[in-house]
Image (cartoon, rainbow, N blue to C red):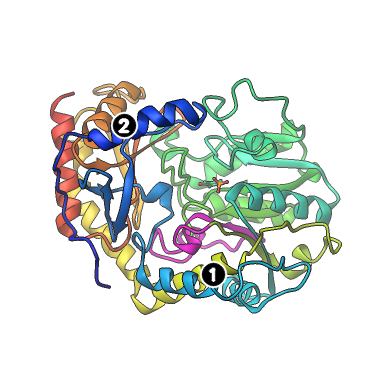
């Protein structure tokens, strides 16, 4: 694709610049403090892997607004599709009078999700809403109540998904009470537990059997690659054993692919790396190039167990968002973006793959495709080092690189650029991160 902004970092002012500082003052008088911000740099436009702020500075975006603009910022074909739809029809509510875009997105989701069986979808607006709907559907299908999620999971910020989200701070603290019948169970975290996938799976299964009872469980939610949890990739064989356990016990196995899905890890859905076919999949973030859209897709008999009217919502599968999603699917195929993501993985491995050997405060560098984590530790130990991460993030954001934090201990540097990022930008961003390392 062609970019409307040169793909290079360029700083004209200090960061944040004067216009950002002005906006920040206004914001403090009008926006809730609860909407915390990583870097108070106000953005004006973007293209590819570059964001341009209100002062004209060009920043390298290694975050994509948490994995959303996977295909690059403001892709002209997404803009054209959305704008054409916006002047044609913006809303009917699919459950009042339907339209084709919704059906087309559902058809496409059936095609790109793993599994060689009939699949149906429901479209909603946000990731949390998709997870909530998956909970409702699984409960209805199984007639059971218990919902199992993994340690370090992130499933959203609504009341139900907050309860499924692992860490109390900042997502949950002080905002209960939470719904019952939600259980967190041990995950496979190779860097920290040293267990094989099979060993970790037995630990997880034993926990479920002894604390909850397999016959009580409606659904088991997993992120095949945890995002907010710190780019945790369970050991090989872990999900295979868990999915067998779910099948043996009539539990709906749900892959929450909201962050890792849609090309980010070099495949359509990150569960493909584990060779497992889930019963249900949730999709959101990267699906529509920044427009709000989310989906639950899965086995037709599970998805159809809900009575008509039991799931849905006013804006779900909005005509404009679905038009944008159809453009995104098209772009991923036409521009070979699955391969582009695999290529980003190769470039990242060759540039930052040796950081754990080079720096004693880097515990591990891990990732798939354009989704990487750098786990920071106290030198020579595995003790999380959130102070180091805070200092790195402060340095890089004020030097024109937007990267993200992650991990239950806030000690994982999360790198999730657009898959169209160039090798030069990766090298330049890595150099800025290494400058930050030099100050630790
Ligand atoms: C972001 C995210 C969610 C929540 O999505 P929202 O659109 O913010 O509600 C759920 N699960 C995962 C894995 C996510 O990364």
Q: CB at mark 2 closer than 8 A to ligand 1?
A: no
Q: Residue at x 18, y 37 (%)?
A: 399
Q: Residue at x 18, y 31 (%)?
A: 436
- Left or right: 426 as drawn, with respect to 345: left
Q: Which residues are magenta?
A: 262-291
Q: Residue at x 34, y 61 (%)?
A: 72
Q: Position of residue 226 (x, y in %)?
A: 48, 45
- Asked whether 15 or 409 is in front, the reply is 15
- Asked whether 349 or 159 is in front, the reply is 159
Q: Earlier in the sequence, mark 2 or mark 1?
A: 2
Looking at the image, how many numbered discs can be counted on the residues?
2
Please check the rendered image and state whether residue 405 is part of the magenta-colored stretch, yes or no. no
Q: Position of residue 38 (x, y in %)?
A: 37, 34
- Asked whether 197 or 163 is in front, the reply is 163
**Element on which disc 1 rests:** helix
Label 2 sits on residue: 22
Residue 357 appears in the rendering: yes
Q: Quick one: label 2, few (<14), some, or many (20+) residues within 10 Å?
A: few
Label 1 sits on residue: 86
Q: Quadrant of the C terminus?
A: top left
Disc 2 to disc 1: CB gap under 8 Å: no
Please check the rendered image and state whether residue 273 is part of the magenta-colored stretch, yes or no. yes
The part of the image, by quadrant, that contains residue 295 is: bottom right
**Element on which disc 2 rests:** helix
- Left or right: 276 as drawn, with respect to 400: right
Establish if 187 lies above or below 105: above
Establish if 279 lies above or below 161: below
Q: Quadrant of the N terminus?
A: bottom left
Q: Position of residue 244 (x, y in %)?
A: 65, 56
The part of the image, by quadrant, that contains residue 117 is: bottom right
């Amino acid at each position: 694709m062609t970019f409307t902004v040169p793909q290079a970092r360029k700083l004209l002012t200090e960061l944040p610049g004067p216009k950002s500082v002005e906006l920040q003052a206004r914001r403090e008088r009008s926006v809730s403090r609860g909407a915390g911000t990583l870097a108070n740099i106000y953005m004006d436009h973007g293209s590819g892997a570059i964001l341009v702020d209100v002062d004209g500075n060009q920043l390298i975006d290694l975050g994509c607004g948490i994995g959303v603009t996977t295909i690059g910022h403001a892709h002209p074909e997404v803009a054209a599709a959305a704008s054409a739809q916006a002047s044609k029809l913006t809303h009917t509510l699919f459950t009042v009078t339907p339209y084709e875009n919704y059906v087309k997105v559902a058809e496409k989701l059936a095609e790109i999700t793993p599994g060689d069986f009939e699949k149906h979808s429901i479209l909603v607006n946000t990731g949390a809403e998709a997870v909530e709907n998956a909970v409702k559907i699984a409960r209805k299908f199984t007639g059971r109540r218990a919902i199992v999620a993994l340690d370090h999971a992130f499933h959203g910020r609504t009341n139900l998904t907050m309860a499924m989200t692992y860490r109390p701070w900042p997502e949950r603290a002080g905002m209960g009470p939470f719904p019952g019948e939600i259980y967190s169970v041990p995950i496979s975290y190779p860097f920290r537990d040293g267990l094989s996938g099979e060993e970790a799976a037995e630990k997880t299964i034993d926990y479920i059997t002894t604390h909850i009872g397999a016959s009580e469980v409606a659904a088991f939610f997993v992120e095949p690659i945890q995002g907010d949890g710190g780019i945790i990739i369970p050991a090989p064989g872990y999900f295979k054993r868990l999915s067998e356990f779910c099948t043996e016990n009539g539990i709906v196995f749900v892959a929450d692919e909201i962050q890792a899905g849609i090309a980010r890890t070099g495949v359509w859905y990150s569960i493909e790396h584990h060779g497992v076919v889930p019963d249900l999949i949730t999709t959101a973030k990267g699906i529509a190039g920044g427009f709000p859209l989310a989906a639950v897709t899965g086995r037709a008999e599970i998805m159809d167990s809900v009575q008509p009217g039991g799931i849905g919502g006013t804006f779900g599968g909005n005509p404009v968002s679905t038009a944008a999603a159809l453009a995104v699917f098209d772009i991923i195929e036409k521009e070979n973006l699955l391969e582009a993501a695999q290529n980003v993985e190769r470039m990242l491995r060759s540039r930052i793959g040796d950081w754990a050997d080079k720096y004693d405060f880097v515990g591990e560098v891990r990732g798939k495709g354009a989704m990487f984590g750098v786990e920071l530790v106290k030198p020579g130990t595995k003790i999380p080092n959130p102070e180091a991460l805070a200092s790195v993030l402060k340095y890089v954001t004020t030097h024109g690189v937007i990267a993200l934090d992650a991990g239950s201990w806030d000690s994982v540097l999360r790198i999730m650029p657009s898959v169209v990022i160039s090798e030069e930008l990766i090298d330049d961003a890595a150099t800025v991160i290494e400058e930050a390392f030099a100050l630790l």
